[in-house]
Amino acid sequence: MPAELKLESSMPHLSMRRSISSDGAVGTDRLRHLEQAALRHGVPVEDVLLIAVNLYGITSDQDRHRARVNLRLVRRPDAPWQIIVPLNQPASPFRLRSDELSLNGEVVAHVGRIDADEAVGGYFRNDGRAATLNPNARSRCVGCGWCPNTLEAAADPRMQEDQGLDALLHALGEQHPRRSLAELTEVTVSTGCFEREEAAVAHLTALRPALERAGVKARIGFLTSVLRSDEAFETIASKVSPFVLRLTAEHFTRREALMKATKADLRPEQMPDLLMRARAAGLDTSYTYIVRLDPMEDLVRGVNALAGEVTAFPNFQVFQAHTVMMQGMRTPGAESLEYYLQARTAIERAMAPTGLRPVGWECYRPLWYFTYAGEDLVDGPR
């Protein structure tokens, strides 16, 4: 007889009270553990379900390593979410048929749209109020073992001159939901192909006037680990601000083994000082971190060390093992959902003194959805 998993949240308005039948093919122990873990950690099951989708991926008839998936949970259709997950995971308990995402035969979410997660020149987030630019051919960025950039097709050009930025922004404006880039409040430059600090600074000082020509006054965010000198921070503060430095910390251990040299040579003990100097120059600061690669004690130590040096909540994301090789990169014990819920609690404790909270649209693979530190997390469109 199939076992049943009753999904109930610790919060009355965040629950899935209908039993979800499990069939033997997926492993009833893992599904039972999902409910128990949610109750044990005081986390709504809605959050645990979305973390689990990121962790296990989806099995479907689409042979894609990863895709952007827009979905709404059955019990919380008011909150749309966009996640990036692999759709070719046959061992996953989540199955996509037509527009229905099921967990062991029970529909838990409706999928509105699926887009290939290709490396493109740019795309919108937060209902058109934020944009991500890939102006330096993100798809050509290789070297970090955990990164899936090279698994999908690419259509992201390398910008050579100011006219290239103008053309990119013009094309992006044509794709905006309301054809107005003036609505943008955040423009994130997401690329790892600026191998030298000088090249990164030159690009940023060209991007600001290009945005102004397009009528955009948004804060620029830059994901990088090559901006390190006081001179660079001062130039950015005077010519590029408003600006947020999103340091690509990624993980604190095994950096030389898993990262390319331009990232690995930034040691964890150097990161607090780097962020402090950027903040002293008048820049906003944050960082990106992949949850699954470090032992828990190293995660806690690193997050605590950086907590006082950030002005924006860091981007903590679930590590997705798209290949067998990537599966071997996980720290022991991180294959379980328990690791992520422990990490979630540990990060909340470390970040509590800052008063910062996660913003839903900023991360496709977060640890927080409907609640953060026991409080409702409401931040508008995602």
Image (tube, rainbow, N blue to C red):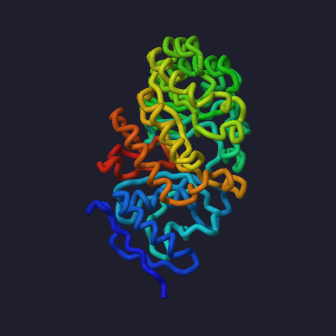
Please say whether residue 172 is visible from this viewpoint.
yes
Image coordinates of residue 362 in percent, x first then y, are 47, 41
Q: Quadrant of residue 210?
A: top right
- What x and y, as percent, mark residue 174? 54, 37
Q: Is residue 127 visible?
A: no
Q: Residue at x 26, y 63 (%)?
A: 12
Above/below status of 313 relative to 94: above
Residue at (44%, 16%) from the top-left corner? 282
- Asked whether, in this view, residue 239 is left or right of residue 20, the answer is right
Residue depicted at 73% across the width and 39% down the height:
142
Compare residues 110 and 83 and report the one nearer the observer.
83
Residue 59 position, x and y percent, is 60, 67
Q: Examine the rendered structure and indicate whether residue 163 appears above or below residue 382.
A: above
Seen as rendered, the residue at the extreme bottom is: 1
Please tell me which residue lies in front, 16 or 304.
304
Residue farthest along the front direction in this orientation: 297
Quadrant position of residue 199 = top right
